[in-house]
C-alpha cells in the first residue's frame, strides 16, 4: 500500500509539472505580451522594451518556465521585485521564499495576499454545496436504481435529467428572477458582508442552490446507473434466494458494491466545483476564487492566473489520488 | 430470416438442395437509431432538438426582424407587443429574432466542435487501445493531464489568452473533450480486441489501420452515439457559459449566453431579457440529454 | 407423498413484443430424498422452471395457471414473506456461475453466516461454527481461512464448493442445481459431482438437477426428464431412459453424442437436423416435429400431444412412440481402423513459450514435441492452463515461440507471426475459434469476412469471382447462400460456426486449427458441425489440429492425441493407445472424469487432490507430481521424469515403469 501511495504521489507531481507547464506556455507564450501585461496598457513602449530585456524574456519558453519554478520554490528571487524596475512591487515575505507566486498586477498586491482568502470563501461555498449534493444525489440515485424501470425510477430519473440540463448561469438567472425579483425572499448578490441588510447565511442560499441543483442531478444519475447495474447482478439474486429480507439485500449486498463507482464520481465533483464556482460567483458577485480567476484572466494578471490554476490543479489531482485510494479500499478485488 | 440450420445429411457428402433466402425476407439490422421511436424519452428529446434545428434553418425566411435591427421606440416598453412577441432587449433588438438567430450560432458551433473532438479523440483511443505499450502510456498520460484541469478553468484560461472567436471556441472544446473521448474509445477497444474476429482479421493479414477502422471502430458505435448526444449538451452549456462570462462570440452575433448576461443588468425591472434566452438554452440541452438517456435505455434493453 | 409437485404450470413473460410463453403447461413430481434430473438445451425453459419454483421470475414474469405444491403450500400463490421463509431454508439453489453468484465485496464468512442467522435465529458465533462445519463437509481445507477470504481469492472449483455449502447450511429438503459444473474443468467437475452425491446422502436432501449434459445428469440422478421447447417430452428412471429411450428427441440426443469407444469410421455420429427453437414461439402439436425424422403431417402437428405411459414409470410425449421400435446405436468396432499415414506436415520440436510475470517465469509451453501428418486429425487435450491455446496461437501466427522449432512443410514458422509470414503461409494455416459469438464481427454482414479472406489470399480477384466463391463456400458448409447478407446476431450458434468454417477454408488451408469449435454449441447441433468439419477435412486431405477437453469427442475424431498439463506434454500417441493401459496417471484421471451417458460402462473414480498449482517457476520434477494419485515419492518432485515408449509412436512422461502402468485396472469396464 505504501509503495502504491508513493508511486501515485510521484505520478501526481509529474502531472502537476506538465500541466503547470502547459498553463505557463499558454499565458506566457508571447514574451512581448508578458512585458506589456505586467506594465499595463498605458505604459510606454520604451518601458516595455526595458522590462523585456531585464526579465530575459527572449530566453526559450522552457528556460523561462524553469526560472518560474525557481521563484516558486524559493530558489530564485522574484525578478519583478527588483526596485531598479520601478514597478513598486512589495512583498513583506521578501523576494525569495518557498511558495512565492509573484505579484498580482490586478490587485496590486502579492498573490499570496489575494489568493488564500478567496480560496477560503470558495471552500465554504463548495463545502456547503457538497453537504447538499451528497445526500440528495444518494437518496435520488438509490431509490431510482433500486427498482429500475418503475414509476419512481422514471420520475426521479427525469427530474435528475432536468436538473443537469439547466446550466448554472441560467439557473442563477431563473432563481434570481423568482426569489429575488418576484418574491423578495433572498438577496441577489452575496458579497459576504452584512451591511446591505441581508444576513450572511441568507446570502449563501442561492449560490449553494445553483451549485447543488445542477450537480446533484449529475451525481444522482451516476448513483442510479450503478445501483441499477448492481441490482441486476447474480449475487443479488443469490442474496434474495437465501431468504434475506429486502432491507438486508439492499443495505448489505447492494449498497457497498453500488457505491464503488459513485464514490470516485463524488470526489471528482470537488474538481468540478472548482470550475463551477466561476459562473456562480460571477452571478452573485461572490468574493471567491472563481471570480478572481476570471477577473485575472480577463485582465491578463499572469502571476495570479498561474498561481490560481496551480492551486486548482493541486486540489484536482489530490482528489484524484484520494479517490483512487478510496477505490482500492472499497473494492477488495483491486487489492489483490 | 429463417432461423435454424437446414436439414442436412452431413456424412453422406451428397449435396443438399438449399433454398435461397428471399432478399425481402431479411430483417433490417436492429439499429439503435432506427429503434428510436420505441423510447418516449428519446422522442421528446429529439422533438426539442428538432424544434430548434428547424427554427434555425428557417431563420432567414421567417417574418421576423433582423437580429441586430434596433427599434428605438420599443426600448421604452420592452415587454411583449404585437411587433415584438417576446419583447426587445435593452438596445431595442427583437428578442424572438435574436433567440432564433442565436440557435443558428450554437447549433453550428456545438456539432462542429464535437465532431472534430470525436475525430481526434477516437483516433487517439483506437491507437492507444490497439497498440497498448508505450503508445498507450503516452496518450493516456497526456489525456490525464488535460482531464485533471477543472473544465471551466481550462476554458477561461484558453479563451482569455487566445481570444474569443468561433474557431477558438471549437479549438478549446476539442482540446477539452478529445481526451475524454479517447479514454472511452480506448476502454471499448480494450474490451473488443480480445474477440476472435480481431484474430480472424489478423489471420487474413489485414493491416492495423483496417483492423482499427473497419473491425473495431464500428463496434464502438452504440456507446459513442449516446456519448455524442451528451457531449452536444455539455458543449451547448460550455458555449452558453463562455458567452455569459464575456468570453463568447464577439457582438453583435446573437449568442444565448451573452444575451442572458446582457439581460442581468436589467433583471430587477425586465427579467424577460435574461429569462427567455435562459429557457431557450435549457430546452436545447434538455433535448440532447433526453435523447442520450433514451438511447442508453434502448441500448440496455437490446 | 411428493415433496414437490408441479401441476399444469404455465410461465410467461411480458415483453415489448407481447406475451412470451416460456413454459406452456408442465407437470412433474419429486419425492423426498429423490435425485431428479432435467435435461434440456438452451432456451428450453429449464432455468425458468427453477426460478418459478423459487418465485423469482422478475418484474415481467408471471404464472397465470397451475400450482407448485411444496410442503403443503402453493408457491405460486405464496406471499413475499412466506417465500422468504422457504428460500434458502427449505429450498436452496446452487448456481451455474459461482464466480458471479458470490458477492465480490463481502468475505465468504459474512455471506455464509447470514443463512443460519436469518433462518434459525442463531447468533453470529454459532452461525460461524455451523458455517465452518459445512465448509469442512464440502471438503474445503482450512475453513477458517476460507471464511476470511473474498471470492476472488478462491479458484472456480472452491467457489462452487462455497456456494454448495451456502445452500446446505440450513439443511434444505430440496436442493436445486442449475448446471453447477458448467465452465469447470473436467476433473473439477467430476469432483463436484461426487461431492453432490455424497452430500445428498449425508443431508438427506432431494435434488433437482438441471443440465444440458446427459453424461453429467447420468452421474447424479435416479430419474431423468427430458425437456424440449418448454415441455417435458420424456420422464423415466435413469437406466430405462438410456437403455430404451422412447422420444425421438431423446434418441436423437443419444445418437448425436459420441460414446466412448466409437470413432468416426466405425460409428459416425447421427446429427439432429436444424437448431434449437427460439423460446416462446407459438406452435401446434409437437414442438420437436420440425426437426423430427419420424414426424407425420396430420398427426404430429395438430392439437396438444399428451404425455403417455410407455411403461410403468416411463412417460413419453409422442404419438408415435410405440411405432418406432428400439433404438439401435451402431456398435463400436472392436479394432480401430488404422489411420492412413501421409507425410509429416507439422513438426513440433522442443517448442517453448515463456512469459515474464513480474520477476517470475511462466512456462506456457515447455519443450513440446510431436508430429502431425497430412490428412490426420491431431487432438490436443488438457484442462485450462495446460497451454493448448497458447500453442494454437503460435501455430496460427498470433503469437511467437521463445524456444525450439515449429516446422510447417519444412519451413520454420514458430518464430514468425502472421506479419512476418508470406500470404501463402498465412492462408495455409487457418483457425476456427471456440466462441461462436466472438468469431464474427457483429457490425458486418457475415459474407464479408469470407469475401475479404478470398481477396486477401488472392484466391478471387474480381467482384464476380468473389461472389461466386463465397456462394460455393457457403454451399460447402450447407448454408443457404442468401445468409451472407445477414448480421451475426441473426444467426444461431451453429450457423455462426459454419460461417467461421467457410471463412477458414477460403484460402484452401493445408492445416486447420479447431479450438474447441463445438463446446459452446447446443448439444443437438454439435454433431452436425463436427461431421461437417470432418467431411471437409477429409475431402481436402488437410491436417486438423483439434483442441478439446472432451475426451469422448477426441476418441471419436482424432488419429493422434497429445495430452498436456501445465504447459508440458504428459502423453502422446495414436488415439487407440491412449484409451487403454498403459496410461499416464493424468490421462487416467481425465478418463475417469469423463461424464458418460452410458450406464452399461463402469468407470473407475479417481480423485485429484488440490487445485492446479501455479504455473510460475515450476520445480525440476514432474509437473503433475503435486496431484498425482500414483506418485512414487520425492523422486517425482526432484527428478525430471523420463520419456517412456511402450509402443511405436506412444510416449508417456512418467517415472513409473511401463510394466506397472500396463498393469493398472482399465478405467472403463463393462458394468
Image (spheres, rainbow, N blue to C red):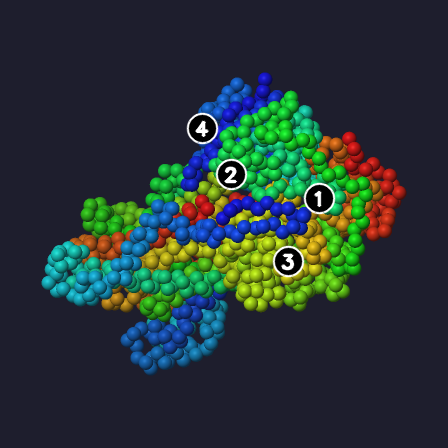
Cα distance, mark 1 to mark 4? 45 Å
Does dot 1 land on a helix, a strand or a loop?
loop
Residue mark closest to the camera, 1 vs 4: 1
Between tags 3 and 4, which lies in front?
A: 3
In this rendering, is residue A266 above or below C589?
below
Q: Residues within 10 Å of mark 3 (few under 14, many from 20)?
A: many
- Residue at image mark 3: C505
Spatial separation of the CA atoms under disc 3 and disc 1: 23 Å
Going from the N terminus, do you reach mark 1 or mark 4 first?
A: 4
Q: CA distance from mark 2 to mark 4?
A: 18 Å
Callout 2 crowding tier (Cα within 10 Å): few <14, some 14–19, many ≥20: some
Residue A264 image position (x, y, % from top left)? 47, 49
In this figure, which residue is indicated by the disc labeled 2?
C279
Q: Quadrant of the C terminus of chain C?
A: top right
Q: Residue at x 52, y 58 (%)?
A: B216
> In the rendered view of the protein, which quadrant contains the N terminus of chain C?
top right
Q: Nearer the viewer, residue C539 or B53?
A: C539
Q: Which residue is mark 1?
A: C268
**Residue under the image location 75 percent in, 32 percent down:** C600
- Please tell me which of labels 1 and 2 falls first in the chain: 1
Q: Give the labeled residue for mark 4.
A: C64
What crowding class fits label 1: few (fewer than 14 Cα within 10 Å), some (14-19), or many (20 or more)?
A: many
Instruction: Give the residue at the far top of this rendering.
Output: C1
Q: Specify whether B20 is left or right of C603.
A: left
Question: In which chain is the residue bearing label 2?
Answer: C
Q: Is residue B209 left or right of residue B291?
A: right
Q: Chain of mark 4?
A: C
Amino acid at each position: 500500500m505504501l509503495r502504491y501511495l508513493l508511486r501515485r504521489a510521484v505520478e501526481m507531481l509529474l502531472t502537476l509539472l506538465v500541466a503547470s507547464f502547459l498553463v505557463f506556455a499558454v499565458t506566457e507564450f508571447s514574451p512581448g505580451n508578458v512585458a506589456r501585461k505586467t506594465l499595463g496598457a498605458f505604459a510606454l513602449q520604451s518601458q516595455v522594451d526595458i522590462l523585456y530585456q531585464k526579465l530575459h524574456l527572449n530566453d526559450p519558453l522552457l528556460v523561462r518556465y524553469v526560472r518560474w519554478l525557481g521563484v516558486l520554490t524559493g530558489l530564485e528571487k522574484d525578478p519583478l521585485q527588483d526596485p531598479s524596475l520601478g514597478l513598486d512591487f512589495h512583498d513583506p515575505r521578501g523576494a525569495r521564499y518557498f511558495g512565492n507566486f509573484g505579484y498580482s498586477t490586478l490587485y496590486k498586491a502579492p498573490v499570496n495576499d489575494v489568493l488564500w482568502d478567496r480560496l477560503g470563501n470558495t471552500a465554504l461555498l463548495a463545502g456547503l454545496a457538497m453537504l447538499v449534493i451528497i445526500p440528495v444525489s444518494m437518496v435520488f440515485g438509490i431509490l431510482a436504481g433500486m427498482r429500475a424501470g418503475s414509476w419512481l425510477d422514471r420520475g426521479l430519473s427525469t427530474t435528475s435529467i432536468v436538473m443537469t440540463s439547466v446550466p448554472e448561469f441560467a439557473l442563477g438567472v431563473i432563481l434570481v428572477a423568482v426569489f429575488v425579483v418576484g418574491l423578495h425572499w433572498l438577496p441577489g448578490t452575496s458579497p459576504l458582508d452584512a451591511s446591505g441588510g441581508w444576513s450572511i447565511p441568507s446570502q449563501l442560499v442561492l449560490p449553494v442552490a445553483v451549485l447543488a441543483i445542477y450537480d446533484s442531478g449529475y451525481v444522482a444519475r451516476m448513483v442510479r446507473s450503478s445501483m441499477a447495474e448492481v441490482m441486476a447482478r447474480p449475487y443479488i439474486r443469490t442474496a434474495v434466494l437465501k431468504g434475506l429480507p429486502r432491507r438486508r439485500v439492499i443495505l448489505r449486498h447492494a449498497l457497498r458494491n453500488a457505491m464503488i463507482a459513485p464514490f470516485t464520481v463524488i470526489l471528482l465533483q470537488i474538481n468540478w466545483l472548482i470550475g463551477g464556482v466561476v459562473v456562480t460567483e460571477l452571478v452573485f458577485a461572490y468574493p471567491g476564487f472563481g471570480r478572481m480567476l476570471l477577473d485575472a484572466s480577463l485582465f491578463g494578471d499572469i502571476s495570479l492566473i498561474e498561481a490560481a490554476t496551480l492551486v486548482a490543479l493541486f486540489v484536482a489531482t489530490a482528489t484524484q489520488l484520494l479517490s483512487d485510494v478510496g477505490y482500492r479500499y472499497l473494492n477488495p478485488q483491486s487489492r489483490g | 430470416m429463417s432461423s435454424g440450420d437446414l436439414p442436412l445429411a452431413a456424412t453422406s457428402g451428397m449435396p443438399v438442395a438449399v433454398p435461397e433466402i428471399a432478399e425481402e425476407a431479411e430483417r433490417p439490422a436492429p439499429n439503435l437509431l432506427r429503434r428510436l421511436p420505441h423510447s418516449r424519452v428519446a422522442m421528446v428529446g429529439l422533438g426539442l432538438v428538432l424544434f430548434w434545428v428547424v427554427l434555425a434553418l428557417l431563420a432567414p425566411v421567417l417574418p421576423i426582424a433582423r437580429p441586430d435591427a434596433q427599434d428605438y421606440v420599443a426600448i421604452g416598453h420592452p415587454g411583449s407587443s404585437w411587433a415584438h412577441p417576446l419583447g426587445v432587449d435593452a438596445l431595442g433588438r427583437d428578442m424572438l429574432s435574436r433567440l432564433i438567430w442565436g440557435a443558428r450560432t450554437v447549433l453550428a458551433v456545438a456539432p462542429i466542435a464535437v465532431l472534430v473532438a470525436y475525430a481526434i479523440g477516437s483516433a487517439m483511443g483506437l491507437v492507444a487501445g490497439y497498440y497498448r505499450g508505450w503508445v498507450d502510456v503516452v496518450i493516456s498520460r497526456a489525456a490525464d493531464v488535460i482531464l485533471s484541469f477543472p473544465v471551466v478553468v481550462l476554458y477561461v484560461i484558453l479563451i482569455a489568452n487566445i481570444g474569443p472567436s468561433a474557431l477558438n471556441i471549437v479549438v478549446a472544446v476539442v482540446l477539452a473533450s478529445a481526451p475524454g473521448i479517447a479514454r472511452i474509445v480506448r476502454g471499448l477497444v480494450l474490451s473488443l480486441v480480445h474477440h476472435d474476429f480481431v484474430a480472424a482479421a489478423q489471420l487474413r493479414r489485414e493491416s492495423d489501420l483496417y483492423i482499427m477502422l473497419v473491425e473495431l471502430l464500428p463496434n464502438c458505435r452504440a456507446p459513442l452515439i449516446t456519448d455524442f448526444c451528451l457531449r452536444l449538451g455539455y458543449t451547448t452549456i460550455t458555449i452558453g457559459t463562455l458567452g455569459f462570462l464575456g468570453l463568447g462570440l464577439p457582438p453583435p452575433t446573437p449568442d444565448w449566453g451573452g444575451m442572458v448576461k446582457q439581460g442581468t443588468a436589467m433583471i430587477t425591472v425586465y427579467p424577460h431579457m435574461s429569462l427567455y434566452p435562459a429557457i431557450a438554452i435549457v430546452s436545447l440541452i434538455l433535448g440532447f440529454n433526453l435523447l442520450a438517456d433514451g438511447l442508453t435505455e434502448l441500448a440496455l434493453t437490446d | 407423498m411428493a415433496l414437490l409437485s408441479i401441476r399444469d404450470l404455465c410461465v410467461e413473460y411480458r415483453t415489448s413484443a407481447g406475451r412470451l410463453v416460456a413454459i406452456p403447461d408442465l407437470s412433474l413430481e419429486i419425492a423426498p430424498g429423490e435425485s431428479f434430473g432435467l435435461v434440456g438445451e438452451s432456451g428450453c425453459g429449464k432455468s425458468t422452471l427453477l426460478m418459478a419454483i423459487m418465485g423469482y421470475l422478475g418484474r415481467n414474469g408471471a404464472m397465470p395457471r397451475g400450482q407448485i405444491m411444496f410442503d403443503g403450500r402453493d408457491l405460486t400463490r405464496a406471499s413475499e414473506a412466506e417465500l422468504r421463509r422457504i428460500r434458502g431454508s427449505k429450498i436452496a439453489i446452487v448456481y451455474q456461475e459461482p464466480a458471479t453468484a458470490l458477492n465480490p465485496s463481502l468475505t465468504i464468512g459474512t455471506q455464509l453466516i447470514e443463512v443460519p442467522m436469518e433462518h434459525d435465529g442463531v447468533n453470529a458465533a454459532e452461525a460461524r461454527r455451523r458455517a465452518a462445519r459445512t465448509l469442512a463437509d464440502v471438503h474445503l481445507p482450512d475453513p477458517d481461512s476460507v471464511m476470511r477470504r473474498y471470492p476472488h481469492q478462491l479458484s472456480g472449483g472452491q467457489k462452487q464448493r462455497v456456494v454448495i455449502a451456502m445452500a446446505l447450511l440450513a439443511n434444505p429438503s430440496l436442493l436445486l442445481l442449475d448446471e453447477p459444473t458448467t465452465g469447470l474443468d473436467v476433473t473439477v467437475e467430476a469432483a463436484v459431482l461426487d461431492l453432490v452425491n455424497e452430500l445428498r446422502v449425508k443431508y438427506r436432501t432431494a435434488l433437482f438437477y438441471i443440465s444440458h449434459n446427459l453424461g453429467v445428469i447420468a452421474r447424479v440422478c435416479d430419474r431423468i426428464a427430458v425437456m424440449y421447447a418448454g415441455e417435458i417430452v420424456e420422464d423415466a428412471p435413469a437406466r430405462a431412459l438410456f437403455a430404451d429411450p422412447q422420444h425421438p428427441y431423446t434418441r436423437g440426443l443419444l445418437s448425436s453424442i459420441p460414446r466412448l469407444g466409437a470413432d468416426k469410421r466405425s460409428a459416425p455420429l447421427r446429427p439432429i437436423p436444424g437448431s434449437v427453437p427460439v423460446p416462446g414461439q407459438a406452435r401446434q402439436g409437437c414442438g420437436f416435429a420440425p426437426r423430427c425424422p419420424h414426424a407425420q403431417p396430420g398427426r404430429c402437428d395438430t392439437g396438444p400431444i399428451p404425455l403417455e405411459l410407455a411403461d410403468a414409470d416411463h412417460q413419453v410425449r409422442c404419438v408415435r412412440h410405440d411405432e418406432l421400435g428400439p433404438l439401435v446405436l451402431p456398435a463400436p468396432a472392436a479394432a480401430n481402423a488404422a489411420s492412413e499415414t501421409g507425410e509429416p506436415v507439422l513438426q513440433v520440436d522442443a517448442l517453448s513459450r515463456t512469459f515474464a510475470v513480474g520477476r517470475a517465469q511462466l512456462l506456457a509451453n515447455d519443450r513440446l514435441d510431436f508430429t502431425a501428418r497430412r490428412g490426420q486429425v491431431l487432438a490436443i487435450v488438457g484442462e485450462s492452463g495446460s497451454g493448448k491455446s497458447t500453442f494454437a496461437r503460435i501455430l496460427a501466427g498470433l503469437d511467437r515461440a521463445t524456444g525450439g522449432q515449429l516446422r510447417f512443410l519444412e519451413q520454420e514458422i514458430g518464430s514468425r507471426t502472421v506479419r512476418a509470414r508470406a500470404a501463402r503461409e498465412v492462408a495455409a494455416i487457418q483457425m476456427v475459434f471456440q466462441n461462436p459469438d466472438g468469431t464474427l464481427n457483429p457490425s458486418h454482414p457475415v459474407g464479408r469476412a469470407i469475401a475479404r479472406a478470398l481477396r486477401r489470399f488472392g484466391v478471387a480477384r474480381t467482384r464476380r469471382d468473389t461472389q461466386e466463391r463465397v456462394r460455393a463456400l457457403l454451399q460447402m458448409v450447407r448454408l443457404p447462400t442468401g445468409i451472407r447478407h445477414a448480421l451475426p446476431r441473426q444467426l444461431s450458434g451453429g450457423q455462426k460456426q459454419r460461417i467461421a468454417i467457410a471463412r477458414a477454408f477460403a484460402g484452401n488451408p493445408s492445416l486447420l486449427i479447431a479450438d474447441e469449435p463445438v463446446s459452446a454449441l447446443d448439444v443437438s447441433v454439435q454433431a452436425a458441425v463436427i461431421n461437417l468439419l470432418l467431411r471437409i477435412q477429409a475431402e481436402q486431405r488437410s491436417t486438423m489440429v483439434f483442441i478439446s477437453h472432451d475426451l469422448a469427442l477426441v476418441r471419436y475424431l482424432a488419429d493422434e492425441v497429445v495430452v498436456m498439463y501445465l504447459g508440458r506434454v504428459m502423453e502422446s500417441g495414436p488415439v487407440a493407445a491412449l484409451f487403454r493401459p498403459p496410461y499416464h496417471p493424468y490421462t487416467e484421471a481425465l478418463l475417469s472424469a469423463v461424464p458418460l451417458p452410458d450406464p452399461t460402462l463402469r468407470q473407475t473414480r479417481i480423485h485429484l487432490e488440490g487445485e492446479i498449482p501455479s504455473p510460475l517457476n515450476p520445480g525440476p520434477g514432474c509437473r503433475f507430481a503435486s496431484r498425482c494419485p500414483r506418485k512414487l515419492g520425492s523422486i517425482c518432485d526432484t527428478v525430471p521424469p523420463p520419456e517412456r515408449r511402450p509402443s511405436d509412436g506412444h510416449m508417456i512422461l512418467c517415472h513409473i515403469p511401463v510394466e506397472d502402468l500396463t498393469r493398472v485396472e482399465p478405467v472403463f469396464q463393462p458394468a
